[in-house]
Amino acid sequence: MTRENVRIGLFGYGCVGQGLHDVLNSSKGFKADIVKICVKDRNKKRRISMDHFTYDKNDILNDPSINLVVELIDDADEAFSIVTTAIKSGKNVVSANKMMIAKHFKELVDLQAKYKVSMLYEASAGASIPIIRNLEEYYDNELLYSLRGILNGTTNYILTKMHNDGLPYADALREAQEKGFAESDPTLDVDGWDAKFKLCIITGHAYGLFLNPEEVFHYGISRISKFDIQYAKEKGFKIKLVPYVGKTSDNTITSFVLPRFISSDKYLYNVDNEYNGVITEAAFADKQFFSGKGAGGHATGSAVLSDISANSYGYRYEYKKFQQGTVSNYTRDHKLEVYLRYSDEKHRELFGFEEVSEYFSGRFYKYVIGIINLKNLYALREQLRDLDVFIVNTGRKL
Amino acid sequence: MTRENVRIGLFGYGCVGQGLHDVLNSSKGFKADIVKICVKDRNKKRRISMDHFTYDKNDILNDPSINLVVELIDDADEAFSIVTTAIKSGKNVVSANKMMIAKHFKELVDLQAKYKVSMLYEASAGASIPIIRNLEEYYDNELLYSLRGILNGTTNYILTKMHNDGLPYADALREAQEKGFAESDPTLDVDGWDAKFKLCIITGHAYGLFLNPEEVFHYGISRISKFDIQYAKEKGFKIKLVPYVGKTSDNTITSFVLPRFISSDKYLYNVDNEYNGVITEAAFADKQFFSGKGAGGHATGSAVLSDISANSYGYRYEYKKFQQGTVSNYTRDHKLEVYLRYSDEKHRELFGFEEVSEYFSGRFYKYVIGIINLKNLYALREQLRDLDVFIVNTGRKL
């Protein structure tokens, strides 16, 4: 494939697909033909001529003139089938499907090597923020202590509305959905799945470990109450949903997704609404911060176009950290200080607090701040969905 | 050159050279040999064995076993001679010398093409922030409206100390020099030269124009007074030195370096001390922000190592925006709203204010806020050094 003849088969024409179309039409530097667009819904009105569309994926996958498959659909299983078929036919792939990539990460890396094709997916984590490419290229030799950030636009929008405008959770969620930020299934966003998939992709490029998402603890914001927001405000914090991955020793990392208190002197404090932000801490570069739009068709579409363009220059991820293999272990044996808001003492006992520094009991709720082990949280993960509690990482260095 | 046999000839063993040495020694993923280090001062005590050093540049430049020259000296003319000789001998180059690159930008681009070698210089602008590579790779097809930021650690350190601790300018400058942030000649920092060189390098990668630095207006902070800090504080602003480059039409850009008022809801407000920060605004990705350490041996050394590593993977800048050639004109005919603090009415008249929105006259100083044209500032550039005035861009969109 040379720069001149990028011929794209596009799957999906939702928010991001249309965004990509707009960005591509406005791009002056780079032209690529969208030869065919494969969609599911025959009855949906499309804003461009129906000649562009097909309902049969083989019209793209079997077309030898198409050299790049851009996959922007919701369904992770269908996406995996499309992407693997494309790779096996020698087509390069650009995807934004975090669930699909996170669930089949190692397999996709192996397939790229086996069939000598390139799959790029910058838009899958942090949307417009070029975090994957920077981890892959720029932090190649940096001793990266940790990476944390805001990676889900929907929850950040909800938390912003709750904090700034005093909206109840349900109203804020509805507003996020109306704005088109939410995934088709909101539980993926609000329960922290989406942030976890992104964290797993980032972990692959930051540390070279392709984790099974099932192994990573995640917790979202669907149990947040006005009391939690009130507590945070009194202390000068905002609550943000913050995925974290970091070293616990030279060859071992831990990771998790938890809400976190953020004080006003921190970069993440001002990352509001649908914006995402990522903080890296490294031995020599020290602290770095990247921020940009984390949702929306145009922001995500511009990241997809950047991948399409990089692809046309022959760029591929080399998975350098994986090749180096310095990090080989993953642990959940990791202590955290958390705030736990609860009502039933029996629930508190489940968490196995090792140290308690604050305890409050009032008419409407109770909370405790103390140290727990991540492995206990992980063991509780199924139960947590049904408990009337809310957990926030205080972020205190232990 | 393969990954296995990067053999480096290093010029300079000051703050950044030693920082690079530390980073290289700690890197686990990538090994590169520093074969020889060329330094000037025979009497300076070195922290490693004298066997590593030479005082004759030809010991490096004529050594065919050395395939990468890393140039980290202060002297821009000597650096240019070293770098061009290296390129002409087919050696790849990594440099952090912003003055040298900005002054000979087009020539260096042409030489790389002619001799088929790669010259990387990520550390030359924004130190640890990977801004050049992101402009080159990631914003390839983005409609970039503008880029602005804090690119000089010394002035930012001085302004932070003046604002936060109430230090007078001279004391804050001394502290910055003691911390090792200042360039060997502080006028390069405090008068805005350093920020301008970096801006010119960024402009080459953001818009594909290789500007003669003489064509770009710059103004620094050496004339700042406590009254300016006091005014900014009263209004809830910080003053930061902010280089700017942006489009004025589809094919035309303008650029300048000026102090700027920053309000507390802006990302740059919290970019303090030696940190740098860059904001890009683009058609589809919208606003993005990058921040990291902008000075110091280790932060800069880690950017240099990243270039060394990228070089070993065969990476080279393709100067994509220059190849595309969409931007072809540079203008200084551009209106700005500024704050001018002054004492002599004759000085104010020089600026040709077109509109005045505020005017203040007090016992100690006067100020005016109004609209001026950048071309008038440029015409005054020599005189400005001797006037008792201070200029701040209000940043208001006109």
Image (spheres, coloured by chain):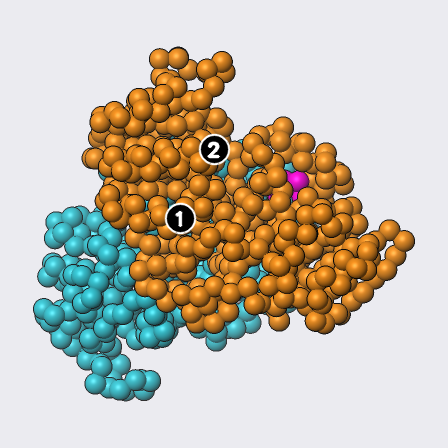
Chain colours: A orange, B cyan
Please tell me whether mark 2 sits on a helix, a strand or a loop.
loop
> Label 2, on which residue?
A75
Q: Is residue A398 above or below residue B200?
A: below
Q: Residues within 10 Å of mark 2 (few under 14, many from 20)?
A: few
The answer to whether B84 is drawn above or below residue A162 in the figure is below
Q: Please state which amino acid type lies under the numbered disc 1.
A: Phe
Q: Is residue B42 above or below residue A49?
A: below
Residue B275 lies left or right of residue B185; in this view the side is: right
Label drawn at residue B178:
none
Q: Which residues are magenta?
A: A155-160
Please state which amino acid type lies under the numbered disc 2.
Asp
Q: N-terminal of the two: label 1 or label 2?
A: 2
| SS class, disc 1 | helix
Task: Give the residue at mark 1.
Answer: A105
Q: Quadrant of the N terminus of chain A?
A: top left
- Tell me the chain of label 1: A
Confirm whether residue B315 shows in the render: yes
Q: Residue at x 61, y 39 (%)?
A: A187
Residue B104 percent location from the top left of the image: 24, 53
Q: Residue at x 35, y 48 (%)?
A: A107
Please say whether residue B222 is visible from this viewpoint: no
Q: Measuring from the top left, give residue A189's x and y in whole percent.
A: 59, 41
Above or below for A236 versus A283: above
Image coords of residue A233 (percent x, y): 75, 52
Image side of residue B355 versus residue B3, left or right: right
Residue at the image point whose x is 22% and y is 63% from the top: B3
Q: Residue A207: horizontal and vertical position, in percent?
A: 41, 60
Which SS does the magenta portion mostly show?
A: helix
Decide which of B236, A185 is in the foreground and name it. A185
Q: Residues within 10 Å of mark 1 (few under 14, many from 20)?
A: many
